[in-house]
Amino acid sequence: MAASRLIPILTLAIGLALPVHAADESAALQVADTLVEDAHGALTAQAGADERAERLRAALQSSFAFDIWERFLIDPEKDGFSADQMIEFRALLPGFLANLYANQFGKGLEAKPEIIEARPARKDILVRAAIPRANGKNLPVDWRIRDLGDRGHMVIDVMVGGTSFLILKRDEFRGVLDQGGPEGLLDFMRQNSI
Amino acid sequence: MAQTNSGPAARLVGAVVAAVSEAPGIVLGAYALAIAASIWAATGLGVDTDSSKMLSPDLPFQSRALELREAFPDQKTAMLVVVRAPDADRADLATAEIVEKLQDAPGIESVFAPAIDPFFQQNGMLYLSVEEFGDQMTRISESANLIAGLRADQTLGGFLSAIDQARRLAEGGDRSEDLDTIYAEAARVLDAAAAGRTEPFGWSAAFSGEQGEGPVLRVINISPSLDYTLLNPAKPALRAIEAVIAGIAPQTGVEIGITGDPALRAEELRSVTAKIFWSLGLSLVFVALVLWLALGTVARALLGLGALLATLILTTGFAAAAVGSLNLISIAFIVLMVGLGIDFAIHFLAHLDEKAARGQGPALAETGRSIGPALLLAAGSTALAFLAFTTTDFVGMAQLGLIGGIGVLIAFAVSITLIPAVVALRPGLARGQARGPRRLRAGGVPGKRVIAPMLALAGVMACWWAVDARFDADPMNLRDPDAGSVQSFGWLIAQPGLSPLRVAVLAQSPQEAAQVASTLQGLETVDTAIWLGDLVPQDQLQKLDLLDLAWPSLQHAAEGSPEDLTESRQITPERLAEALTGGPKSAGAQALAEALTAYASAADPLPKAGLEQALFASFPLLQARLSAMLQMDEVTEQSLPTPLASRYSSADGRYLVEILPKADIRDAVARSAFVLDVQAQMAEATGAPAQIEGATTTVSRAMIQAVLIAGLGASLLALITLRSLLGTAAIVLPVALAGAVCMAASVLLDIPFNYANVIVLPLIIGIGVDTGIHLALRVREEGSVFDTATPMAAFYSALTTIAAFGTLGLSDHRGTASMGILLAIGLCATVIMCFALTPPLARMIHRKS
């Protein structure tokens, strides 16, 4: 019992010892602006579906911290993945998130999303964007951006109405993993990636 | 007769009675002074209901318990208010109200209610497993905008609108089932509202997704300011808590109880004393009636009652001087003395009538010489039976033994001094014959030759069950099961993790505490072993990481403005019901659709304002909890609330390890297995269950010891007086058989011996030997006993005693009641055995000699 308790405590101590970078609102706004710009460009490009998907994936690739997404999405069950399965998971994740992005924000896009504001959320910055909808209203989206030091500011979550996409997908992934294990999840991701 | 009446005992008692009858005024004056002094002394007599003090503090398990109490004194004095409600919100609302009102109540030092304590509001979720924590964060994240919407508009329209928007979003994301608990809870509230009733919405359970079965318990720990000038030092606090609870507005399904040692003891004292006086009054009525029957006239009955009252007062005075404070066992001396105190008066007055009828005048001295040896022997043997307990480690019973033993001697002294003094002044009191059957003639009983052997056989057969007699040292089994404190205690025991019945080990260091907990955790009978280190949540890194992830959701729920994520529309109960019916099917959605329709079409529903009150009454609790959770942070031993930390670490630097059992240890077998299991690893383990087990062993040993001493002592006294082994056997054998019958009855009626009724066996010996001596000596004097006043006197004496003891059975206090029942059974058996067996045996010996 003592050993099992000691490990998280030590880990916590190590975690606390790591340098924490103060979030920079202007940098976060820049990241969000670039992401929205690139993603909008990709989604509205006069090109084939594959090219649009590639451009959207590339937009996310440059701004999303996939390692953090990966940690929250599959961390407890990660040990059950083989090396090959992990490689495939990492390969599929950007396409999966790009597909999610396209499904959630890419329908009926007529005007470019507008960056509204940035506000602190603990050690991160929430950048609010308004995505125009077909009914004329705006969908409020928050990009959660974290300062990752040398890697710069990156998106670690997307939120709509206070609901975290990362938490929702984490829950969804756990359900799929419980049902079909790593292979089942990879299959699910293959079907939902672009 | 000549032999007995000329012995030293006869001469001594005769001389005393003669001297008294020469100067009755002086004797009565002396009694008046003694009684006045006793009444003055008795005003300072207290009652201590602490059952743990009934055994010697030098016993190893007692000294360990004392050590624990010294290290953690609050455990003994803390009081617990237990709130039991159908759901968490109602429990928390009542808890919050009680805590707020207790802050300014007199006699209260501190109040700690974990359920609403800021520390647990903030960090309570860290005590969940990582998986449970993650699930909760998911629910909060999913519901963030719903909560924000409900927070912004706490009207029926706002409620329906927020639910409708959440429904559409959930259906869009194929997650409709996530709202099922909220739908179900709303359906319950609306169903009640349709019927015109108020059922508050349980927000905590709806959002946690945990609709638990059975009631929710909340515990408020209260440290009272103790006033040691009072018999119950926690009494002011107890009164204040009772007043606060009385002032709480009643809510459907919410029950509030007070328990903890001071409350249990106070109610126990109340249940013992409440009916002890009722019992005493009834005893006195019975005694008066029996006296009138036994002594023939009202004046003689009053004389007998006066002698009894004098005995009671003088014995109470002695008790005050000797022990100062009675315990739950020794308080029964009052009733015992009614029964025992009258015996001597009846025998003396019956003999006086018999002697007076034969000669001229009151014949006091002759009566003293005649009855003196029997009375002296009876007093000696009964006193010995009581005093036998003073030699054991059973301190509680030793006290009753001392008071009872001396009380019997006082009763004897009163019968040979006070009664002759009054008779000397009023000689007419010497005469008066018993009413009822003039003589109890054994010869007149049909089939007498069969009855005696059959009774003897029955006594021998009773030994078959008697060997299974057991002692139950659990103090909870003595208490009135209907008492509020006992019921509240039962609520706690029934709830896993809250049972106060725990074994404890004191450790000198955190390392030792962790080691002890680790060792005991693996035992088969142990559910959990907890020490201070266990109060620091595990896997905090992972949980805080998840919190960090969900923090913006939490903030949105607690502080944010609701986002309009779907197309707004005017929503009514009917429209929402229609939408739910048309959406994905689920039990909650269907129930809510039906409830909305029922409410919309109800003839006499709860008014809208009432429904809004029902919907949102406990919503502030959810808001407060979410706001507090925004500050959730790492918990360390240092950041634990002091009332919690001080429960497990003492002021002198020692650590408490608490061990909770897997089984319900109200069951004696499970308790014994649990304690033995733990003590096999940690011999120094203490706590209530260990104390009960230790007490069981000690008291069982004390019972055997006392019964042996009483039996041997009484036999020796009888042997010295009768100078005959067979004569002694004629007295002792029926009593032994009666004891076997009583023990068999204890087994067959499932009334185990306990702290209160354990006096029965030595008492049977004392009273049985008394009766046997009177009967045997009369056979020896007269050749036959049933032609004399003795059987009638013995019969009425026993009847008085049985009537007096039987009234104890009326007590709400289970221990006292069991004492009354077992004593009545035991004494009936004693009288029957003595009347059936002693005279024929004594006659056989008399004929031989």
Image (cartoon, coloured by chain):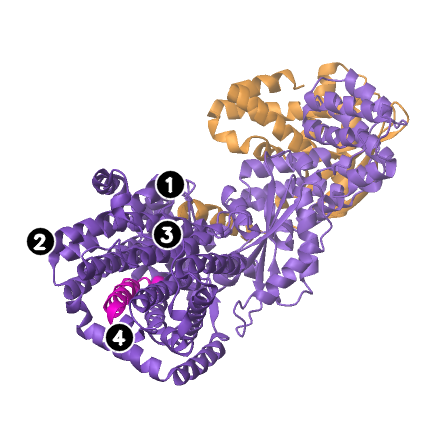
Chain colours: A orange, B purple
Q: Which mark is residue B840?
A: none
Amino acid, disc 1? Leu
Q: Which stretch appears magenta?
A: B369-397
Q: Are marks 4 and 1 on the same chain?
A: yes
Sort mark 4 into few (<14), some (14-19) or many (20+) by Cα contacts within 10 Å: many
Name the image quarter holding the N terminus of chain B: bottom left
Q: Chain of mark 3?
A: B
Q: Mark 1, chain letter?
A: B
Q: Are discs 4 and 3 both within one chain?
A: yes
What residue do we see at 16% from left, 52% from top?
B843
Residue under the image location 62 percent in, 67 percent down: B107
For label 4, the residue is B13
Q: Earlier in the sequence, mark 2 or mark 4?
A: 4
Examine the residues drawn in magenta and state their main secondary structure.
Answer: helix
Residue holding disc 2: B848
Q: CA distance from mark 1 to mark 3?
A: 13 Å
Q: Badge 1 local density, few (<14 within 10 Å), some, or many (20+)?
A: few
Per the image, label 1 sits on a secondary structure element best described as loop
